[in-house]
Image (cartoon, rainbow, N blue to C red):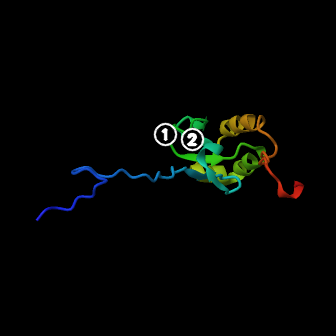
Amino acid sequence: MGRIVNSNIEKGKVAKKTASRVRHIPQRTCVGCRQVIEKKALIRLVRTDEGIIIDRGGRLSGRGAYLHEHKDCWEKGLKGSLAKALKIELTENDRKLLRAYMANLPDEPEKPIVIGNEADV
C-alpha cells in the first residue's frame, strides 16, 4: 500500500512554526522600595573586595543589588536594606561614594506619559 503524504509538505521536510515566542524580560527588585520591574530600569550596585561599585552596564561579577534611579529609593537603601542585600557592612567610603552619586539623581521618579486620556475626549 502507498503512503499518504500531505500535499502541502514535501516528503522529508518539516513545516516551520509561524508563531513567534515572546521574549523573556529579566526582572529585579529595588531594595529601596521593593518594587519588581525590568532589570534595565534599575541601577545595579556590586560588592567587590575593594568596596561597592556602581555597575551601570549590569555585567560585573559579584553579589549585586538594584535601586531605582531616584533619591527616595537610595535614601531607603542606605538606611540598611542595601547592606543587607549585599551581605556587608557599608564603610564610610562606600557611603560617601553612594551619597555623591545620589546627589545627581532626581528627587522623584519620572511620571509615565499617558497618551489618549479618555476623560479629555
Which residue type does callout 1 highlight?
Answer: Ser
The residue at 67%/56% (across/down) is 35
Looking at the image, which is closer to me, 88 or 53?
53
Q: Residues within 10 Å of mark 2 (few under 14, many from 20)?
A: many
Q: Is residue 2 left or right of residue 119?
A: left
Query: Picture coordinates of residue 52 (x, y %)?
Result: 60, 39
Q: Is residue 104 left or right of residue 18?
A: right
Q: Mark 2 points at which residue?
A: 46
The residue at 56%/45% (across/down) is 64
Query: Picture coordinates of residue 7 (x, y %)?
Result: 28, 55
The residue at 80%/51% (across/down) is 116
Which residue type does callout 2 highlight?
Answer: Val
Q: How crowded is mark 1: few (under 14 residues within 10 Å), some or many (20 or more)?
A: few
User: Going by the picture, which residue comes out furthest to the right?
Assistant: 120
Q: Quadrant of residue 36?
A: bottom right
Q: Quadrant of residue 54?
A: top right
Looking at the image, which is closer to me, 79 or 32?
32
Lower sequence index among marks 1 and 2: 2
Q: What element carries label 1?
A: loop
Is residue 35 visible to us here?
A: yes
Query: Picture coordinates of residue 66 (x, y %)?
Result: 62, 47
Give the quarter of the figure containing the C terminus: bottom right
Give the alpha-carbon distance from disc 1 to disc 2, as whole Å. 8 Å
Q: In which quarter of the image is residue 5?
A: bottom left
Q: Mark 1 points at which residue?
A: 61
Contact (Cβ within 8 Å) of mark 1 with mark 2 = yes
The residue at 36%/50% (across/down) is 16
Which label number is shown at residue 99? none
